Structure formats: C-alpha cells, structure tokens
Amino acid sequence: MIISPPPTLPSRAVIDDERRFETITLPCEWVEDYHPGGYHPVVLGDVFNDGQYKVIRKLGEGSYSTVWLAHDLKFWCQDISRLTTEVQMLRHITDTAPAQAAQYNTRLLGEFDHRGPNGVHRCLVFEPMGPSVNTMVEELPQFKPRLFGMNIRYPLPMAKSILKQSLQALAFLHENGIAHGDFQPGNILFALTDLDSTPEDVLRQEEDVQARLVSPPVERLDRKQDKWAPRYLCVAQPLVPFTRYTEGFKVKLSDMGGAKPVTPLGLRASELILTGTVNNTLDVWSFDCLVFELITGQPLFCIPGPEHEDDDHLLSLTAQLGPLPDELFKHWKTSSLYFTPEKKLFNCELGGATPGEEPLMVEESSMEELFDQAGPDLDDEEARQVKALIRWILQYDPAKRPSPAEILSDPWFRQIDIEDDSS
C-alpha cells in the first residue's frame, strides 16, 4: 500500500532535518518525526477502527512505531513497508505451529488500516505485554529505593530463566526458517497478569502535565498551527504494576526485524560491522552478548557512538575476543590508524593518534577478565562453564557458531529449570 500524504506539506525544514517545533525534553519520541510518512498523531482518548479501540495509555515508542494500550489490547502504528515483512513472518509461524508461536512470540490478534494527516498506517493489534528485559530490572523491588553503588542486575535464577526462554524462542524461529533480525533485551517482553478484571480507570493514563505524564502543548517555532503532530506527547507508562516477574514468569519475543538488521551497536557481529553480511547467526551472536550482560549486569561491548563507532567496536572485539581473521581484517579500512602492517596494535585513540603526540595505549581486558571483574553471583565452576559457553558462541566465523538448538543442549542450559506456567 502506498502512503498517501495530505495535500499541504510541512515546510522544507522537515526534509532538511531542521527543527520545526519547540524542544520537548520529556522521554518521548522525537516530535519532528510527526510529518507526512511519519508517526500518526495519537492522543489519549482517540478511537480507532470504527470505534473498536479507545486509546487509554502510552506503552512505548520505537524507530518505526508508537505503542499504545487500547482497552485491554495494544496496537502499533508502523511504517508499512517494514510492517509487511513482520506480518508475513508472524502469520507464517502462527500457521506452522500455533501453540508454540503463542508460547514464544507476542500474539498478533488483528490488524487494520487507519488514514490520518500523515498518510495511511497499518495498525497491528497484539496481546498486551509488560516491560522489556531492558527496563524491567530497574523496577524490581529490591532496587527501590536505589542506593549509591548498588549493583543493578537480575537475580541469577531470573537471569537464567530469561536466557533459556528467549533461547527456546530463537530456536523455534530458526527451526521454522526465520531469523529475528533484532534480537536484543528491548525486544524481550514480560507477560502480564490477567488484565480483564482490571477497571479501565486503573489502566488509563492521565493527561497530567505537572506529573510529567504528558508534555506541554506541542508548539511550532513559527507559531503556526500544525495538523501533522499531536496536541501533546505522552510519556510511556509500561504496565509494570501488572507484570509477572516472580516464579513462573514468562517472556516472549517481539518486534521482528526481518530482512534488515537493526541490531543495537554493541550487539553487532563482526561480519555485520565490516562487510554488512546478514545471516541467521546474527541472532546467535546477539544472544551470546545477552548472556554476558544478564549474568554480569554489564554489557559485553559498550559502544557510545556515533563518532568512530565501528572502530570503537572493532578495537573492543580484538581486545576481548582476540585478533580478527585476515579475511575480516582486510575490510577494516581504518585499521592503519591502530595497527602496524604486521597487525600489531600501537594506538587506541579513536580516529588516530593526535599529530605530534605519542599514540595512546590502554590496558586491555579479555572477555573472561571482564566477566570476573564484574563479580557475578556464580561459584568458580559455574563461572568457568558460562565463560566457556560465551567463548564457544562468539566465533568470528559464522559457520562455526552453534545454532540455538545446539546451545540449548549445553550442560549449563540443560540444568536450568523453567516452571511451566501457561496461565
């Protein structure tokens, strides 16, 4: 379907990525993304699909969508071209194995088109889900209030269950010929307790500017009226109070990236950085980074970006995993800023050494050393198992990386028990 823009477009400033609106400092989507072909302007109380869905709460936003709770369902308004791939994948896995698809992936309950000032949007109706693995750790009661120096990471049994459940979901997708394409903690969601018995006024988000639940009115810099943006932006309020996170909790995968990887910087595999190669082992690489992160509470590769982000990441890879193989190293166009022709490291300063000054050298730590420095809640033998597991998976050669099913057969994963809770 072709997006149909309204007859009168915003100024050229939108095309040139210049600001059109007053700055909004609340943690919301970027207000400049409201233009023809961009987000649909949604405010609380809006009704969709001929009165079927009433918007009552903002759950989140992403590069392609905003996510809202409508009564007891949520829907996504997404870019249509990207959406088509995701819908096809969801339908395929649901038709192939409906019970397993519902167990491992957020269920697609319906879809409809909505025409607005910014074009035609396809809205997906999913089962409501709780916060992501990326954010839920901040909400655990043991970290409230947060104290100085507190180590914020999932309790070990909880981390193990998240890892095994998400790996089982990956195995299911790969066995059905589908790569997720954006496997990351932000796309692993916690299941909710039953919302059917919860009154709407308990779930509804208030239009309260003072409580910073919504922004002040959206205003253009030229003070003209704007029909492409909403009157205000909502701050996301995930369904934390209704999330199951104790024994028997369930997590599911969401937001399939499809054929175009949109992996966060620190989770990119070496071949994706250097050659743009796409293969289903990218999910496996990302998963292994998540093993390190959930067990230690720290990312394996922290890439601030965007300046020299590739060099930063590649230097981290060589420090923590070892030298890149020649067939990959030759694609590193700026490697001479850091390595001699014999591939010996002489400089760690991103962008190259400052003219007239000595190259910068910093102490390097291997993956195993970083793991131990983080002090995970493991005895020596289990720590050895996990480090060996990570090293087994994080191989530069995609052909040598194990499949999700093979990883599940590892002794460490086999001993993780997941309580069967289908309610």
Image: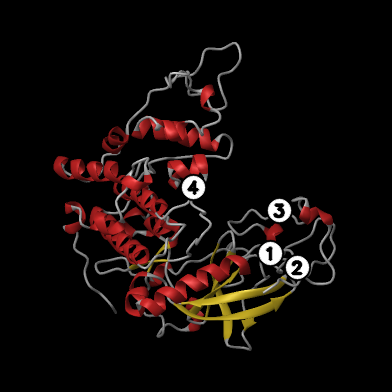
* Amino acid at circle 2: Trp
Per the model, the C-alpha gap separating discs 1 and 3 is 18 Å
Q: Nearer the viewer, residue 54 or 313?
A: 313
x%, y% of residue 5?
A: 77, 70
Cβ–Cβ under 8 Å for marks 2 and 1:
yes
Question: Circle 4 sits on which residue?
Answer: 277
Frontmost of labels 3 and 4 is 4
SS for callout 4: loop
| Disc 3: which residue | 23
Which one is closest to the eye, mark 1 or mark 3? 1
Secondary structure found at label 2 = loop
| Disc on the earlier residue, 4 or 2 | 2
Label 3 is placed on what type of residue? Thr
Q: Which mark is residue 38?
A: 1
Q: Which residue is mark 2?
A: 228
64 displayed left or right of 184: right
Q: Position of residue 400 (x, y in %)?
A: 31, 45
x 74%, y 51%: residue: 17
**Image location (x, y in percent) of residue 225:** 83, 67
* Label 3 vs 4, first from the N-terminus: 3
Look at discs 2 and 1 and give the one toward the viewer: 1
